[in-house]
Image: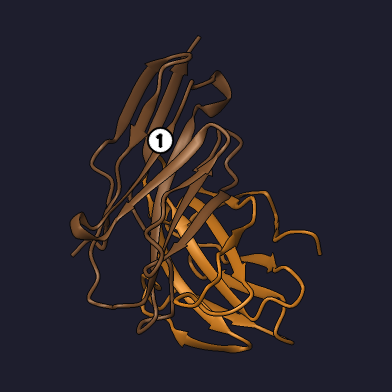
Chain colours: A orange, B brown
């Protein structure tokens, strides 16, 4: 696709429910990243995929968070038993090659998650 | 420890003034990359520039210019003759060749240009 696409744009969920956030990276980009941005805050790294593998899951806040990537393309971030502190904008980014090489990340528009 | 520091949380300038956004980074790698992103009120992060650690040449793109100084570990961003459309949050970021698993972002500087 032309850019990184995320869905849904907005999600309101009740505390305790599970949510799935989807990311469609730029076609051909092997690296994919999930970040979280709380209101007025910076970007918090969650997880990195190279192809379908996740070499770095160090940023996932708890075992309620999981992510997968299939076909080297679409990725899904799942949050189980959502809590109010999970409310944030979840950003997905992709790059041609991994961070640390001559490449930049391109970001989607984000999914704004509100847990009520 | 924070790898990227943007000490200026908020800046306000009057239209047509010049403004410099500061970025200081920390890394032990000899090969690394520095970036600036713009996040307008619409929310989507927009890539502005990438520099590698071996190229300290300053860069100018229209009203934007970047000053990379390895001696002070800084990568500052100047907007000349600011405009209202420049109002946004600006993020500086770093990626390292030896830990190529993420882009490290600063906490951002919120720039408001007053007409």
Q: Residue furthest right?
A: A1
Q: Which residue is mark 1?
A: B78
Disc tally is 1
**Residue A46 in view here:** yes
Left or right, B80 with reference to B40: left
Is residue B56 or residue B73 the one in the foreground? B56
Left or right, A19 with reference to B13: right
Place of residue B44 in the rendered image (x, y in percent of width and height, measured from the top left): 60, 46
Q: Quadrant of residue B34?
A: bottom left
Q: Chain of mark 1?
A: B
Report the residue at 45% width, 61% height from top: B51
Q: Residues within 10 Å of mark 1 (few under 14, many from 20)?
A: some
Q: Quadrant of residue B94?
A: bottom left
Report the residue at 29% width, 78% height from top: B30
Place of residue A27 in the rendered image (x, y in percent of width and height, measured from the top left): 77, 73
A52 versus B111 height, above or below: below
Left or right, B2 with reference to A72: left
Is residue A27 or residue B51 the one in the foreground? B51
Place of residue A30 in the rendered image (x, y in percent of width and height, measured from the top left): 64, 81
Is residue A112 or residue A18 the one in the foreground? A112
Left or right, A28 with reference to B77: right
Quarter holding the N terminus of chain A is bottom right
Badge 1 element: strand
Q: Residue furthest front?
A: B57
B48 versus A96 height, above or below: above
A85 versus B79 height, above or below: below
**Residue A116 in view here:** no
Report the residue at 36% width, 82% height from top: B99
């Amino acid at each position: 696709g032309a850019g990184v696409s995320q869905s849904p744009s907005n999600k309101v969920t009740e505390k305790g429910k599970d949510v799935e956030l989807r990311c469609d990276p730029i076609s051909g980009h092997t690296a994919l990243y999930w970040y979280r941005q709380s209101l007025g805050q910076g970007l918090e790294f969650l997880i990195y995929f190279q192809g379908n593998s996740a070499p770095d899951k160090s940023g996932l806040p708890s075992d309620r968070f999981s992510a997968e990537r299939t076909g080297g393309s679409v990725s899904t971030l799942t949050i189980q038993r959502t809590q109010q502190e999970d409310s944030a904008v979840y950003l997905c980014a992709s790059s041609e090659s991994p961070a640390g090489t001559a490449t930049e990340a391109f970001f989607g528009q984000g999914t704004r998650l509100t847990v009520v | 420890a924070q790898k990227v520091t943007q000490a200026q949380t908020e800046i306000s300038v009057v239209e047509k003034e010049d403004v410099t956004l500061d970025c200081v980074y920390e890394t032990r790698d000899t090969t690394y990359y520095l970036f600036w992103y713009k996040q307008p009120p619409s929310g989507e992060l927009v890539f502005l520039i990438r520099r590698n650690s071996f190229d300290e040449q300053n860069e100018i793109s229209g009203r934007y210019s970047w000053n990379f100084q390895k001696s002070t570990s800084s990568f500052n961003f100047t907007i000349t003759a600011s405009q209202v459309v420049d109002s946004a949050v600006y993020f500086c970021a770093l990626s390292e060749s030896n830990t190529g698993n993420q882009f490290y972002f600063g906490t951002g500087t919120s720039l408001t240009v007053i007409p």
